[in-house]
Each structure stands twice: as structure tokens, then as C-alpha cells.
Image (cartoon, rainbow, N blue to C red):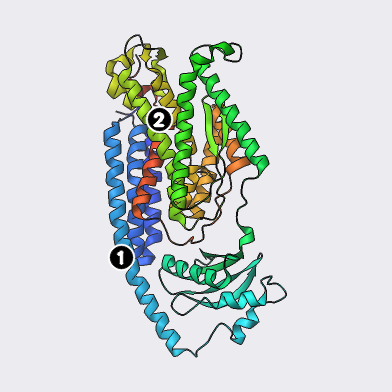
């Protein structure tokens, strides 16, 4: 069944997969039930990928319906295990609170003005005025966050102590109390310290993100004009003419250019709608023009602090969701409208460039993909380019939408590792692909840093959001990963 050259590759994949699963179980065992449930969640997330890539390496094809079924089942099991994990974690939290309560009752009564804490304060380092510091310390309590130590940090302070409630509820109560005491002068962050314990950081509001300046808006407008031009140029190249040399033919390229711009606008509308819903300000989009596919998307900054990681996830996912749905509808509609004599004639190798596009084309066009040239409607090309643009922005790196999604679901450490892995993969692929080299440069110089922490960095998104994030990353890979010639031949794509 397998050639001698394929067997070592398949064996290596299986060994690596089993090693990762076994290592995860070894690390989870000391944490008891909580650890095992968390390990099972990771296994559930990995299983569709392991099956997909394992069978892919073995040249065994699972159709798109089967792949989506695996993802949906995986997401459902992930959500179920997440509920069990939260239930078990809640029991552990209640036991911990009871222990802390008994310890607090048996210890001498203290308050935020005790000598021990005052000794920890270094007045020559703390830049917060003493009056403000006392007011800030007054918002803490035994039923929210019991502060035990204050440390200078940048222009504010870190308050170490014990969290006495659900992170989201405690953060909301502390934020409201701080606003009542100090108005809009300070911002309160609830984050994990290096020792994994919750700490409160209070910083002046002067550190908030800056709004887009007039010069930046002018630059964004220039990039928009350039993107319109490159979208038209892409349309012209697809129609076998150079619009720069034949500007009078811009009307011929206009439908394709408008289709690409529709995908880009849908993407940005998705971000804007969810940002408006969560009362978060966004900068103007800085589009990235590209002659190859019209545009590589846009860079959009947050101009206000995010309340929590759920909001980060919602805003980050909304753009690719809107743009991806528009692109997918264009692609499917174009495939359904394709017939002999359609405007574009594409070599059948075109459909080998993407697992997702090739699978959908095989379902709709059938045996037509065995012809050397396949007649397709222009919407097929526009939809495919839109899916590529969406998938590129879903790469899990830095401040790309995919990087923000990973940061929102799995935290900053995992997002940092995902960024490094993505950059390494792009560097390897760039030896044979100029597009990968371009994105490597864009990420390294413009978007390699993670998004700044949310005000409440501890509360995690729910399991439904995690399932959607898993689906988005899967569709990204299925769009960018090409079919091998052998697998394409089994599917009936090509001669």
C-alpha cells in the first residue's frame, strides 16, 4: 500500500503524535482530575488534525464533509469536556476559598495600612501620588481581592494578594469602585503574575492607546487608493492585459477589482461591527496592496483597551468570518454558474493549489476537472483570491487575526510559541514561494508583537468560542495547503 519512501514519513508522524499525547498525559497526571480533563481537551483538539495529516501523508482522502464532521464532533466533545473541567475546577476553587477563609479567621486582623505592607512600599520608587495610592488601596476587600503587597511598576503599581471570587466578577467590581474613587484617571488590570497567581496592576489612563493621528489617516487613505489600483491591476492581469499600459480598459477589470474590494470591505465591516458592539475603538484600516492578489488585507489597531479576552476573540474572528463567508459564497456561486464557454479558462492544476477549493470544485464540476483547461465563472477566481486573503490573515502569528484568536483562547505564552513556529514555517516555505517571504517580512517588521493585555486577562473565552477558533484555523490550513499530484489524481483533478 505504501512505498518504501512513504513508510518512514508515516511512521515519523505517528511517533511524533503519540509522543506529544503521551508527554501531555505525563504532565497532566500530577494534577489529578483537573489535569486529566485538560489533557483530554487537548487530545480532542488534536485528533482531527492528526487524522487529517496522517491520512493525507498516506494519500488517503477524506472528503470535505467528512473533515467538517470530524471538526464539529471535536468541537462538541471539547465543549462537553470544558463544562466538566469548569465543574471540577469550581469544586477545587470552593475548597481553596474555604481553606483561605479559615486561615484568615485564625490570623490576626490586618488592613491595607499595616506596617508590613507599608514597608513593602517604596515611596522613592512609586510615582502614584500618596493620596491616589491610598484611594486605590481602599477599593480592595476580603471578598474581592485581598492585597498583601504593593510594588512599583512603570507609572503605576502592582498589587499582589489573593483573589476572592470569580475573576470576571471581581474585576468588574474593582473597576467600578476605582472609577467611583478616581474617575477616569486610572485603569485596573487583572493579570497572572510570573508565578501564575492573579495580581492587580493599576496604571494611569495616560498609557491608553493613542488615537490615529492625521498623518496616519492620510497614509491609510494613500494605501486605500493603492489597494484599489492593485485590485484593478490584478483584474487586468487575470484578463491578460496590463492596466498600467492600457488604462482605457479599466472598465474590463472593474468587476474583478470590485469583487476583491468587496471581500476586503466585508472583512473590515466584520471587525467594525463587533468592535462597536463591545464599545471598542478601532483605527483606520491600513491596507496592504499587492499586485499578485490585489491586497493582503489590512492592519487595524485597537484604539482603546479591551475589557477581556472574549472581546479580543470576537473582534479578531469577525473580520475573517465576514470576509471568508463572502469569499466562500462567491466561490460556490461561481462554480455553480460555470459552464463550457465561461470567461476564464484555468489549467486543472489551479484546483490543486488548495484542498478546500479543489474539494469544492470536484463536488460541483465533477469530471470537468480532468480536462487540461477548465471553463469557470469569474466569481470562482474572485472567491478563491478572497479565501487566500482571509486565510493569510488567519495565520497564528503576532497581531494577525489568527494570532489574536490564539492569544484570546490559549493565552500569551501559547501565542508567542505559535508566532515563532509560524515564522519558522514561513522561512522554510519562502525558499520556494515569494508569497511566504512577503508575509514573513510583514509579520517580522509590522505585526510580530502580541496584542497588549486586556483589562481582565485571566477570564478565558467559553468553549463555544474555542470551537469556532478551532474551525477557523482548520479552514485556514485547508485553504493554504495544496493537494499533492497523487492525491489530486485520486480525486479526479487533472488528467
How many other residues sit within 10 Å of disc 2, few (<14), some (14-19) or many (≥20)?
many
Is 22 rendered above or below residue 322? below
Q: Considering the image in quadrants, where does the N terminus appear? A: top left
Circle 1: element type: helix
Q: Residue at x 45, y 85 (%)?
A: 104
Q: Mark 1 sits on what residue? A: 87
Q: CA distance from mark 1 to mark 2?
A: 40 Å
Kindly tell me whether residue 478 is visible in this rendering. Answer: no
Q: Residue 3: x, y in percent?
A: 35, 27
Kindly tell me whether residue 72 is visible in this rendering. Answer: yes
Q: Earlier in the sequence, mark 1 or mark 2?
A: 1
Numbered label tally: 2
Is 90 rendered above or below residue 439? below
Q: Residue 314: x, y in percent?
A: 42, 49
Is 483 rendered above or below residue 377? below
Residue lying at the far top in this picture: please name it.
341
Q: Residue 64: x, y in percent?
A: 30, 32
Q: Considering the image in quadrants, where does the C terminus appear? A: top left
Q: Nearer the viewer, mark 1 or mark 2?
A: 2
Is 427 rendered above or below residue 202? above
How many other residues sit within 10 Å of disc 1, few (<14), some (14-19) or many (≥20)?
few
Left or right, 473 with reference to 443: left
Q: Decide which of 462, 27 is in the foreground and name it.
A: 462
Q: Residue 272: x, y in percent?
A: 47, 43
Q: Residue at x 49, y 47 (%)?
A: 404
Q: Residue at x 28, y 19 (%)?
A: 366
Q: Residue at x 37, y 38 (%)?
A: 11
Circle 2: element type: helix
Residue lying at the far right in this picture: please name it.
124
What is the number of the mark on residue 327? 2
Amino acid at each position: 500500500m505504501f512505498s518504501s519512501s512513504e513508510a518512514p514519513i508515516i511512521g515519523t508522524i505517528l511517533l511524533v503524535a503519540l509522543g506529544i499525547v503521551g508527554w501531555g498525559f505525563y504532565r497532566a497526571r500530577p494534577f489529578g482530575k483537573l489535569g486529566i480533563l485538560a489533557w483530554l481537551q487537548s487530545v480532542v483538539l488534536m485528533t482531527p488534525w492528526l487524522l487529517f495529516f496522517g491520512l493525507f501523508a498516506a494519500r488517503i482522502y477524506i472528503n470535505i464533509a467528512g473533515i467538517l464532521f470530524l471538526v464539529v464532533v471535536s468541537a462538541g466533545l471539547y465543549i462537553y469536556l470544558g463544562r466538566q473541567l469548569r465543574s471540577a475546577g469550581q469544586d477545587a476553587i470552593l475548597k481553596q476559598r474555604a481553606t483561605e477563609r479559615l486561615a484568615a479567621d485564625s490570623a490576626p486582623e490586618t488592613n491595607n495600612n499595616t506596617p508590613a505592607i507599608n514597608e513593602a512600599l517604596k515611596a522613592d520608587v512609586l510615582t502614584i501620588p500618596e493620596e491616589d495610592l491610598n484611594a486605590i488601596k481602599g477599593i480592595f476587600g476580603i471578598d474581592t481581592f485581598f492585597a498583601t503587597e504593593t510594588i512599583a511598576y512603570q507609572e503605576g503599581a502592582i498589587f499582589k494578594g489573593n483573589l476572592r471570587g470569580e475573576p470576571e466578577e471581581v474585576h468588574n467590581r474593582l473597576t467600578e469602585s476605582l472609577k467611583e474613587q478616581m474617575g477616569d484617571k486610572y485603569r485596573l488590570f487583572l493579570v497572572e503574575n510570573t508565578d501564575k497567581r492573579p495580581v492587580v496592576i493599576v496604571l494611569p489612563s495616560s498609557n491608553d492607546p493613542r488615537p490615529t493621528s492625521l498623518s496616519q489617516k492620510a497614509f491609510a487613505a494613500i494605501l486605500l487608493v493603492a489597494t484599489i489600483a492593485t485590485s484593478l491591476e490584478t483584474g487586468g492581469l487575470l484578463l491578460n492585459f496590463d492596466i498600467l499600459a492600457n488604462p482605457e480598459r479599466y472598465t474590463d477589470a472593474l468587476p474583478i477589482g470590485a469583487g476583491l474590494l468587496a471581500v476586503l470591505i466585508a472583512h473590515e465591516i466584520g471587525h467594525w461591527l463587533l468592535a462597536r458592539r463591545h464599545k471598542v475603538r478601532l483605527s483606520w484600516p491600513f491596507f496592504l496592496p499587492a499586485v499578485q492578489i490585489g491586497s493582503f488585507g489590512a492592519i487595524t489597531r485597537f484604539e482603546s483597551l479591551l475589557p477581556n479576552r472574549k472581546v479580543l476573540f470576537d473582534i479578531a474572528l469577525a473580520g475573517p468570518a465576514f470576509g471568508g463567508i463572502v469569499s466562500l459564497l462567491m466561490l460556490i456561486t461561481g462554480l455553480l454558474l460555470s459552464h463550457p464557454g465561461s470567461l476564464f479558462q484555468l489549467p486543472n492544476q489551479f484546483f490543486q493549489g488548495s484542498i478546500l477549493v479543489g474539494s469544492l470544485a470536484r463536488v460541483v464540476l465533477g469530471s470537468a476537472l480532468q480536462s487540461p483547461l477548465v471553463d469557470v465563472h469569474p466569481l470562482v477566481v474572485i472567491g478563491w483570491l478572497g479565501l487566500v486573503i482571509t486565510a493569510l490573515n488567519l495565520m497564528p502569528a503576532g497581531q494577525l487575526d489568527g494570532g489574536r484568536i490564539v492569544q484570546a483562547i490559549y493565552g500569551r505564552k501559547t501565542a508567542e510559541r505559535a508566532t515563532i513556529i509560524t515564522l519558522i514555517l514561513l522561512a522554510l516555505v519562502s525558499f520556494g514561494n515569494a508569497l511566504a517571504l512577503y508575509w514573513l517580512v510583514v509579520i517580522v517588521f509590522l505585526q510580530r508583537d502580541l496584542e497588549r493585555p486586556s483589562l481582565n486577562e485571566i477570564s478565558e473565552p467559553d468553549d463555544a468560542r474555542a470551537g469556532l477558533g478551532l474551525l477557523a484555523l482548520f479552514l485556514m490550513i485547508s485553504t493554504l495547503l495544496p493537494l499533492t499530484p497523487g492525491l489530486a489524481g485520486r480525486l479526479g483533478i487533472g488528467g
